[in-house]
Image: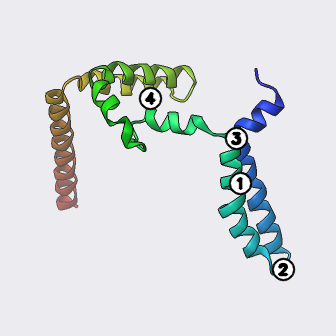
Amino acid sequence: MSGPAERLRENAVEVASLLVTGLWMAALFTGQEWWWAALIVGYVVVIPIVEIAVGDDEGEESDREWGWPWDESDEDERRSDAAGDEDDALATLRERYARGELTDEQFERKLERLLEVETIEDASEHVERAREQRRNREAEGNRAREYE
């Protein structure tokens, strides 16, 4: 369990954002003319400095976890990890479930979907089935409107 200082460090950017927002909104609602300066300086200067100062490496890691390639130097690494992507996806799904980010139903649905699309061919079939189901629902909706 982390102490208050550690939690403050982990959430420093969020705390700074809240303080900046509170400051400029208070100035705005009390009729101060400098509220816009507080807004601009807060969001353009203060928050980026706080983010640099605390060195938020977790955001970069979570971006990669979800497959967002912000850094092009990782391209070769991503290609070499393509074989382990399925295992990574399953591990990520399990971790999210263990952290309580997913309900039982969400976990089971995502697991079934993950297992259905193990290969590119399976993924193509899954997409085609989903399109066909959508077309059927639309056709049923059109027929129901015709009867009305």
Q: Is 120 situated left or right of 44 in this image?
A: left
Q: Which mark is residue 54?
A: 3
Q: Nearer the viewer, residue 48 or 30?
A: 48
Mark 2: amino acid:
Gly
* Inter-mark Cα distance, 3 to 2: 34 Å
Q: Residue at x 37, y 27 (%)?
A: 110
Mark 3: amino acid:
Val
- Sequence-first tag of 1 and 3: 1
Q: Tell me the crowding category of disc 4: few under 14, some 14 to 19, or many 20 or more residues within 10 angstroms, Cα based.
A: few
Q: Residue at x 57, y 25 (%)?
A: 100
Please tell me in which quadrant of the rendered image residue 106 appears: top left
Q: Quadrant of the N terminus?
A: top right
- Sequence-first tag of 2 and 4: 2
Q: Nearer the viewer, mark 3 or mark 2?
A: 3
Q: Which residue is mark 2?
A: 31
Q: Nearer the viewer, residue 55 or 99?
A: 55
- Sequence-first tag of 1 and 4: 1
* Inter-mark Cα distance, 4 to 3: 34 Å
Above or below: residue 46 compared with residue 90? below
Q: Nearer the viewer, residue 108 or 54?
A: 54
Q: Nearer the viewer, mark 1 or mark 3?
A: 3
Q: Tell me the crowding category of disc 1: few under 14, some 14 to 19, or many 20 or more residues within 10 angstroms, Cα based.
A: some
Q: Is 57 situated left or right of 42 in this image?
A: left
Q: Which residue is mark 1?
A: 17
Q: Nearer the viewer, mark 1 or mark 2?
A: 1
* Inter-mark Cα distance, 1 to 2: 21 Å
Q: Residue at x 81, y 81 (%)?
A: 33
Mark 4: amino acid:
Gln
Q: Are marks 1 and 2 in contact (CB under 8 Å)?
A: no
Q: Which residue is mark 4?
A: 106
